Image (cartoon, rainbow, N blue to C red):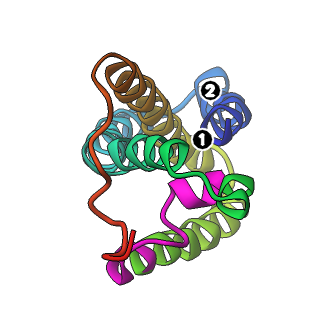
């Protein structure tokens, strides 16, 4: 739901530069940024790392429910707690980076904000699709044990 909400909210901002018109240079940046973000955020970030981990942790939690963990399932699935030290460091560092980037990007004028948001929308949409694909695979064959759980899990 977080990915859907963010994608929905950012899409109009990402499309705004197209409606307003851009120079050839800005169109080049727009296309390049969308392609780069699709690969870096969508494929490398979501499809190969985040999405499989989220689905694996969700299935593990469903099989090993603890009331407090179920209450905080979204943050559990994103490795903010009950994860390896490395997993927690990566999750919290990424959160701080994303919050700082969102705050900074809000101050950019169009078309620059729209160019950045277009890449983010592509990455988030790719991530959403990747989660759905991994979820569908898990429904048919089960999900593997997450590799970022502590040893005592």
**Residue at the (43%, 72%) spot, across then down:** 83
**Residue at the (51%, 57%) spot, across then down:** 78
**Is residue 83 found inside the magenta-colored segment of the image?**
yes
In the rendered view, tell whether residue 30 sits above or below residue 57: above
Mark 1 = which residue?
114
In the rendered view, tell whether residue 102 sits above or below residue 77: below
Circle 1 crowding by C-alpha within 10 Å: few under 14, some 14–19, many from 20? many
In the rendered view, tell whether residue 149 sits above or below residue 21: below
Q: Are marks 1 and 2 in contact (CB under 8 Å)?
A: yes
- Secondary element type, mark 2: helix
Task: Please give left or right for residue 14 compared with residue 52 in the image.
Answer: right
Q: Specify the label residue 97 is tagged with.
A: none
Disc 1 from disc 2: Cα separation = 7 Å
**Residue at the (32%, 54%) spot, across then down:** 146
x%, y% of residue 70?
Answer: 68, 52
Q: Which of the image's four quarters has the C terminus?
A: bottom left
x%, y% of residue 147?
Answer: 26, 60
Q: Which of the image's four quarters has the N terminus?
A: top right
Based on the displayed image, in which of its 4 quarters is residue 36 positioned?
top left
**Is residue 123 found inside the magenta-colored segment of the image?**
no
Magenta region: which residues? 73-88
x%, y% of residue 104?
Answer: 65, 69
Q: Answer with mark 1 or mark 2, whichever residue precedes in sequence.
A: 2
Circle 2 crowding by C-alpha within 10 Å: few under 14, some 14–19, many from 20? some
Mark 2 = which residue?
15
């Amino acid at each position: 739901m977080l990915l859907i909400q963010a994608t929905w909210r950012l899409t109009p901002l990402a499309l705004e530069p197209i409606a307003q018109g851009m120079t050839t240079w800005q169109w080049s940046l727009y296309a390049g940024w969308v392609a780069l973000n699709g690969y870096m955020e969508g494929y490398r970030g979501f499809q190969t790392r985040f999405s499989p981990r989220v689905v694996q942790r969700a299935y593990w939690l469903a099989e090993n429910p603890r009331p407090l963990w179920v209450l905080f399932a979204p943050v559990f699935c994103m490795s903010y707690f009950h994860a390896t030290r490395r997993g927690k460091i990566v999750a919290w560092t990424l959160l701080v980076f994303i919050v700082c980037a969102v705050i900074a990007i809000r101050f950019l004028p169009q078309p620059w904000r729209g160019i950045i948001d277009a890449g983010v929308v592509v990455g988030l949409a790719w991530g959403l699709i990747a989660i759905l694909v991994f979820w569908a695979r898990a429904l048919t064959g089960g999900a593997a044990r997450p590799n970022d759980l502590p040893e005592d899990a």
